[in-house]
Image (cartoon, rainbow, N blue to C red):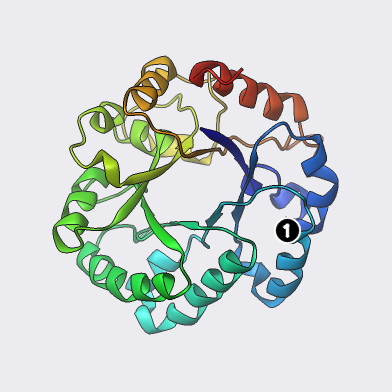
Amino acid sequence: MKVLISTGALLGYVNGKEFRMLKGIVPRLDCDGLEVMMYRDWYERAEELVEVVNCLETDTPVMHFEKSMGEKIVLEGLEQVVDRFETNCKIAKSIGAKKAVFHLWNGTTSDQQIEKNIEAYGELRQISDAYDIELLIENVICNKYNPFCNWNWLIEKYPDISYIFDTKMAAFHGQMDGIYGFDKIDHVKHYHVNDYAGGYMEWSTLRERVLPVGAGHIDFRKFFDFLKGINYDGTITLEASGLNRETKELEYDLLNNQVKTVRQFIGNE
């Protein structure tokens, strides 16, 4: 397994989300590469973003598409999303990413009108396929149904769909054990690994800092034994924030110790 770190763990409001900072950050990381997170205020700088990422001398096999598009599908219609989605695809292809994490539902609207999101997937998938990008639908938190429920509806309509599983999102819905019995596990092509310390659908916890492995109550020994048991040999991404909100500095020890912990779990240490 390759252990990636999300650029979302490195760039945030406390450091202005300035992607040029990655040039100084990446050499101090112990991971196998990056998952590049796209932000809404980067579209006008897309070419510069690609140039910076391609100069980092690290692998970028996964891109996390801008999160708000799933919500925008419902609020404003699919036609308002297509151009932005295609820009994400162009960036992904330009940085060498083969997989894209996508929030098909998101925000306050979430899955309130999931039938619209499910219908939209078909058109978005055609676009991503044209760029040779594998579109992965994340088990994003819901406020009407639940992630596995939405996944099952999607796979009924699109049997060749691919997924990305996030441990924190699953724990929020009390669904960590659901992945161990998921009969379509071969459709899960990537994993986000974060801890969770809250209760069932405890919304207040979502505003807190994303927790590193070991800081919450998820049983990661069971989780990684499961991945090894199914012979998963793909990518996993750590999303726990390394930004200290008070000092506005990156905590490199936190980031690198988390990579070390995960490698011990998977037997790569």
Name the residue at the left extreme: 156
- Check disc 1 and report the residue beneath it: 53
Say few, some or many: other residues with alpha carbon within 10 Å of mark 1 (under 14 / 14 to 19 / 20 or more): many
Name the residue at the right extreme: 24
Query: Could you tell whether 42 is left or right of 82 in the image?
Result: right
Indicate the secondary structure of the residue bearing disc 1.
Answer: helix
Give the total of numbered labels. 1
Q: x%, y% of residue 129?
A: 40, 70
| As drawn, 169 above or below 79 | above
| As drawn, 40 above or below 149 | below
Give the position of the C terminus as an image quadrant: top right
Q: x%, y% of residue 213?
A: 53, 23
Query: Could you tell whether 259 is left or right of 229 in the image?
Result: right
Q: x%, y% of residue 128?
A: 43, 70
Q: Nearer the viewer, residue 222 or 96?
A: 96
Which residue is drawn at the image coordinates 69% and 49% (left, top)?
12
Which residue is drawn at the image coordinates 33% and 57% (left, top)?
110
Which residue is drawn at the image coordinates 76% and 30% (left, top)?
251
Q: Nearer the viewer, residue 140 or 182?
A: 182
Name the residue at the bottom extreme: 79
Whether residue 218 is visible, yes or no, is: no
Query: Could you tell whether 21 is left or right of 63 in the image?
Result: right
| As drawn, 84 above or below 2 | below
Q: Toward which corner of the image does residue 3 lie, by quadrant? A: top right
Whether residue 139 is visible, yes or no, is: yes
Query: What amino acid is labelled 1 in the image?
Result: Val
Q: x%, y% of residue 87?
A: 55, 75
Q: Nearer the viewer, residue 187 or 254?
A: 187
Which residue is drawn at the image coordinates 49% and 60% (left, top)?
67
Q: Nearer the viewer, residue 105 or 91?
A: 91
